[in-house]
Structure formats: C-alpha cells, structure tokens
Image (cartoon, grey):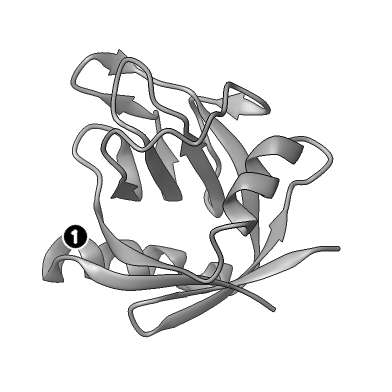
Amino acid sequence: MPQLRITAGPFCFVAHLEEALAPRTCSRFTALLPYRQRIIHVRWSGEACWIPLGDLDLGLGYENHTSYPAPGQVLLYPGGISETEILLAYGAVQFASKVGVLAGNHFLTVVEGNENLAALGKKVLWEGAQEIEFAAV
C-alpha cells in the first residue's frame, strides 16, 4: 500500500495513495514530493482546508472525482472554472467555489491520525494558515 506522510501544523497523518482509482493524479503529485506549502481554511465548502495553486496546470483531467469528500479524503482540483487546488476534508464538505460546486480528484485517503483531522481544521480556522508537507513514508 503506497503511502505518504502529511505533516500539517503540529499534526502528523499517514495517507494511502489511491493509485488504482486516480493513477495519473497520484503520479503527478508524487513527482512533486516532498511538497511544502501553506494550508488555509476553505471559504465555501464547509469543513475542509485547502491549498490554492492558482493557474498551475498539471495536465490532468478528472479521475475518481467527487464533490462530497469524506473526512480524511484529499482532492486535487485540476483547474478549469476555478483555480487549481488541493482540498483536505475534515468534516462535512460540499466542494465549491464562488462559481459553484466543483469536483476534485480523490487521490489520497488519511489512514492514520484521523482523530486529529477536526483539530487541524479548527486550528486553521481560528489561528490561520499552517505549514503543510507531503512526503514519502
């Protein structure tokens, strides 16, 4: 089972790469590792945090896409009607932007540390942007 370590603020998670369901997205993302950025709270989607990536074009289309990720699911929106972004759900989410509902590629699922997802979300909401790193285990 291919996995990544996600360190966000003071929390550490292990996530399973969904290679069978989103092989192109997994391949593109793992080519960027270790990936460091800042994560902020979503505006329209509900209980989630996101990494805005602007007009970054990873050459991806939709695969294993959803608008309703479960807590611990990580989506990569490949861009189009809104900016490219990564979304980490920690609670109830309807993935959206100012232009309406979006669908992102579900390419990672948190399998360890789930009990800290809501704490991360609340920390980002009330304390602001946090450092995040995705790295090979």
**Residue 134 placed where, x, y %?**
52, 68
- Residue 39 placement: quadrant: bottom left
Residue designated by label 1: 125
**Residue 124 placed where, x, y %?**
23, 65
- Amino acid carrying label 1: it is Leu
- Residue 106 placement: quadrant: top right
Q: Residues within 10 Å of mark 1 (few under 14, many from 20)?
A: some
Quarter of the image with the N terminus is: bottom right
The answer to whether 55 is drawn above or below residue 101 in the figure is below
Looking at the picture, tell me which residue is in the foreground, 36 or 6: 36
Task: Answer with left or right where residue 99 lies relative to residue 69.
Answer: left
Quarter of the image with the C terminus is: bottom right
Q: Residue at x 50, y 36 (%)?
A: 58
Task: Answer with left or right where residue 102 lies relative to residue 73.
Answer: left
Q: Residue at x 29, y 33 (%)?
A: 55
> In this view, which residue lies farthest toward the bottom?
10
Q: Residue at x 37, y 18 (%)?
A: 80
Task: Answer with left or right where residue 62 lies relative to residue 103.
Answer: right
Q: Which secondary structure, mark 1?
A: helix
Looking at the picture, tell me which residue is in the foreground, 79 or 99: 79
**Residue 100 placed where, x, y %?**
28, 14
**Residue 113 placed where, x, y %?**
58, 74
Q: Residue at x 13, y 66 (%)?
A: 126
The answer to whether 28 is drawn above or below residue 69 in the figure is below
